[in-house]
Image (cartoon, rainbow, N blue to C red):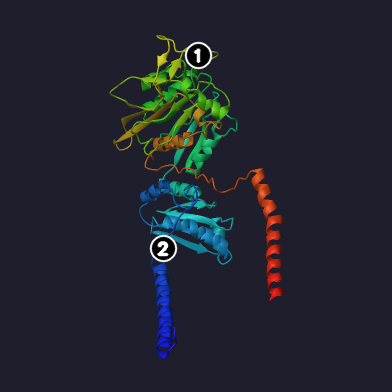
């Protein structure tokens, strides 16, 4: 092509226009970046995005919410705190985050009792909560506690071989109790004989967790009186236990059936989980419409469960909350050796493992009415330390506690699983990577260097 004065001018004009258009595109991208934001969470479990449970919790918090973070001028720590809180601010614009340097305001830190760098104080409607862990689960649990706006307690009956909320044995309930405390529910052991002069508080929930020896008549009378007065109750009973609470069962209109639920169709679940084909494993896979099981889409497992039957009455409204599969039956005989269904003796499934009872009671103060809530479950193992982590058992236990405490509008925050946090490699893969970095890659560099050197020498 012949280069003339006109072609030179056209090429320069082309270069100028390209530079102008490129600058305009960069400027437009910069303007868009300052006015619009887009983020994508590519982690396998979406752990950098708020869970649906946390979003629903924020919808229950009406009004301003303030988080004060007591953190030094350390960019990494403050960035972590801001990153966590920003996830919540996207769904709640009136959530405000403020940083306070403990070195600048030591008097304020001493008055509040701040003991660690990065500790946060959540303030909402004249209530406050402390937070020392940077995670969605910890922050959402703290928000639940500050949202409750009252004292919520579970009193665990003690003195009769019950499952201990403070015990570390496999059959105890300390893991569940710790989860309850993380959500702002107080847990306390209550011995009726030791606390003979103390009335059962109506603002608490009484938990009878698998009593092993019969209660004294005076103790049974106190519990029946507590229930008659509108007290809330969670009764966990293992199959064929004899806690001497027939009067309470009669008052509630329920019968604890004799026998153990077996389901050969579910025994393979026990084989996969525990290495045994014990058929005494009840599976609950579907649930009725109820506040406890609202948006609850998990299987729950009950290792050794019994069955409940209840009478229809005008006083109590009963809901069969937990039902076994139709392939199960209630075995009346021993569960050793070969087990088979005996027509006329065993009860066919589906069987009621858990039931929720409600009724309207008149309050002593003010004369108004309130809803009394009672939960009955024919198994205590599903909340024990050994089995709490199975399927949806923990979630179900937390939902039960929230419902009994009158906080069924609050929901438990499921734990986030992070399967992509670590990289698992086979020995062969690790050996191939090591050989590649130690031998192959240096050899490639040497060969390429030799080729470049040889080519330059020939010029």
Q: Looking at the image, is 87 positioned above or below residue 269?
A: below
Residue at the image point whose x is 41% and y is 69% from the top: 34
Q: Residue furthest top?
A: 344
Query: In front here: 213 or 17?
Result: 17
Residue count near mark 2 (Cα–Cα under 10 Å), binned few <14, some 14–19, many ≥20: few
Disc 2/disc 1 C-alpha distance (Å): 62 Å
Kindly identify which numbered label has been placed on residue 339: 1
Could you say whether the residue bearing mark 2 is in a helix, strand or loop? loop
Specify whether residue 41 is in view. yes
Residue at the image point whose x is 47% and y is 49% from the top: 46
Query: In front here: 95 or 440?
Result: 440
Residue count near mark 1 (Cα–Cα under 10 Å), binned few <14, some 14–19, many ≥20: some
Viewport quadrant of the N terminus: bottom left
Q: Residue furthest bottom?
A: 5
Could you say whether the residue bearing mark 1 is in a helix, strand or loop? loop
From the top left corner, tell me how far across and down residue 158 is, in percent: 53, 28
Left or right of 172 on screen, residue 367: left
**Sequence-wise, which precedes: disc 2 or disc 1?**
2
Kindly identify which numbered label has been placed on residue 410: none
Question: Which of the 4 quarters of the picture holds residue 73?
Answer: bottom right
**Which residue position is annotated with label 2?**
37
From the top left corner, tell me how far across and down residue 169 is, in percent: 60, 30
Specify whether residue 363 is in view. no
From the top left corner, tell me how far across and down residue 454 is, in percent: 71, 70
Left or right of 89 on screen, residue 188: right
Viewport quadrant of the C terminus: bottom right
């Amino acid at each position: 092509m012949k280069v003339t004065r006109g072609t030179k001018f056209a090429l320069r004009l082309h270069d100028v226009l390209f530079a102008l258009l490129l600058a305009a595109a960069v400027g437009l991208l910069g303007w868009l970046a300052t006015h619009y934001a887009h983020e994508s969470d590519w982690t396998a479990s979406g752990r950098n995005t708020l869970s649906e449970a946390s979003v629903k919790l924020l919808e229950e918090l009406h009004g301003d919410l303030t988080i004060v973070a007591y953190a030094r001028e350390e960019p990494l720590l403050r960035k972590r705190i801001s990153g966590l809180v920003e996830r919540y601010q996207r769904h709640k614009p009136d959530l405000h985050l403020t940083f306070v340097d403990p070195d600048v305001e030591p008097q304020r830190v001493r008055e509040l009792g701040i003991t660690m760098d990065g500790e946060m104080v959540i303030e909402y409607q004249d209530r406050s909560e402390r937070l020392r862990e940077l995670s969605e689960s910890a922050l959402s649990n703290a928000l639940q506690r500050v949202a409750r706006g009252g004292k919520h307690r579970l009193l665990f009956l003690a003195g009769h071989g019950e499952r201990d909320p403070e015990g570390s044995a496999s059959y105890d309930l300390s893991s569940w109790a710790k989860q309850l405390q993380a959500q702002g529910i107080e847990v306390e052991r209550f011995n009726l004989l030791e606390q003979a002069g103390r009335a059962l508080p109506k603002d608490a929930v009484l938990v009878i967790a698998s009593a092993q020896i019969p209660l004294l008549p005076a103790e049974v009378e106190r519990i029946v009186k507590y229930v008659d007065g509108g007290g809330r109750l969670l009764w966990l009973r293992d199959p064929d236990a004899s806690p001497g609470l027939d009067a309470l069962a009669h008052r509630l209109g329920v019968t604890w059936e004799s026998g153990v639920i077996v389901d050969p169709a579910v025994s393979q679940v026990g084989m996969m989980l525990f290495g045994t084909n014990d058929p005494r494993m009840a599976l609950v896979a579907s649930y009725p419409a109820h506040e406890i099981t609202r948006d609850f889409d998990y299987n729950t497992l009950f290792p050794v469960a019994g069955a409940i039957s209840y009478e229809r009455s005008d006083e109590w409204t009963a809901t069969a909350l937990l039902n076994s599969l139709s392939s199960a039956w209630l075995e009346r005989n021993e569960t050793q050796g070969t087990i088979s269904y005996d027509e006329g003796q065993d009860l066919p499934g589906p069987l009621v493992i858990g039931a929720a009872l409600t009724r309207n009671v008149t309050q002593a103060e003010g004369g108004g009415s309130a809803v009394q809530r009672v939960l009955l479950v024919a198994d205590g193992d599903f909340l024990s330390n050994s089995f709490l982590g199975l399927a949806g058992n923990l979630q179900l236990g937390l939902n039960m506690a929230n419902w009994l405490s009158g906080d069924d509008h609050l929901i438990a925050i499921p734990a986030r699983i992070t399967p992509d946090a670590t990289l698992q490699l086979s020995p062969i893969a690790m050996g191939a990577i090591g050989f590649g970095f130690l031998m192959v890659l240096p050899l490639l560099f040497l060969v390429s260097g030799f080729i470049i050197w040889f080519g330059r020498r020939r010029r």
